[in-house]
Amino acid sequence: MCYLELIILVQKCIMKYISDLPIAVELFYIHGLTIKQIESKLLNEDYCLEDIESYKDNETVQLSLKAWKMYSGVKSREKKLEEQWPWLGFAKWYLDQDQVCYYCELPQQKVFDYLTYVFENKGHKRMATRGHSLELDRKNYDSIYQESDCVLSCYICNNAKSDVFEAEEFKSIGLFIAKEILKTV
Ligand SMILES: [Zn+2]
């Protein structure tokens, strides 16, 4: 079964009903249903919310939801996104990523644990609103949103890098940040 077919199905699902996105991926990968079977299942009126609930902790489902959330977030502030990086391409790219920060190379959970530690032990007044998930970072100041120009970055690295450093310049700084974080968590 062609990967592209799945992505097309996912796109169809998004137009119909956001919750069907991870379900489609789940049915395809885990349950081995064909695209035709998935389509008829998802378009069935009896398809119930209980089914959706039962898949929600699956890793592929979680990743699919994160991909869509990230894409929608960028789309709301970047009008040309769909033109520069269509959803189909983005989804495929996102699902292929290692889910670690490109700069410090830490998984999201480590960064979140560190931010939680800072909040609980250093007297910060509130938990940072960012930091709950990896962010999409344009590598260089003149980069646009497209596959070759973007990486996943943690909140701490993305914030520190700003639009001042270019990706390769910041890489060594990111590794120092990781060293510091790993002393604590
Ligand atoms: Zn990082």
Image (cartoon, rainbow, N blue to C red):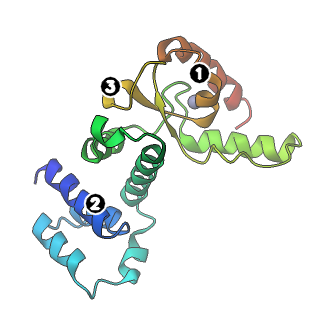
Q: Rounded to the nearest whole Å, what is the CA distance between mark 3 and mark 1?
A: 20 Å
- Where is 63 relative to 100, above or below? below
Q: In which quarter of the image is residue 144?
A: top left
The residue to which callout 1 is attached is 174
Question: Residue 18: image x %, image y %?
Answer: 37, 66
Q: Which of marks 3 and 1 is nearer the N terminus?
A: 3
**Residue 115 in picture, x, y percent from top left:** 71, 41
Disc 3 target residue: 148
Q: Is the Cβ of the residue at disc 2 closer than 8 Å to that at disc 3?
A: no
Q: Where is residue 89 in the image (x, y as percent from the top left)?
A: 26, 41
Q: What residue is pinned by disc 2?
A: 25
Residue 22 is at least partly visible in this image: yes
Q: In which quarter of the image is ligand 1?
A: top right
The answer to whether residue 28 is left or right of residue 152 is left
| Quadrant into which the N terminus falls | bottom left
Badge 3 amino acid: Ser
Q: Which of 1 and 92 is in front in this view?
A: 92
The residue furthest top is: 169
Q: Name the amino acid type tagged 1.
A: Gly
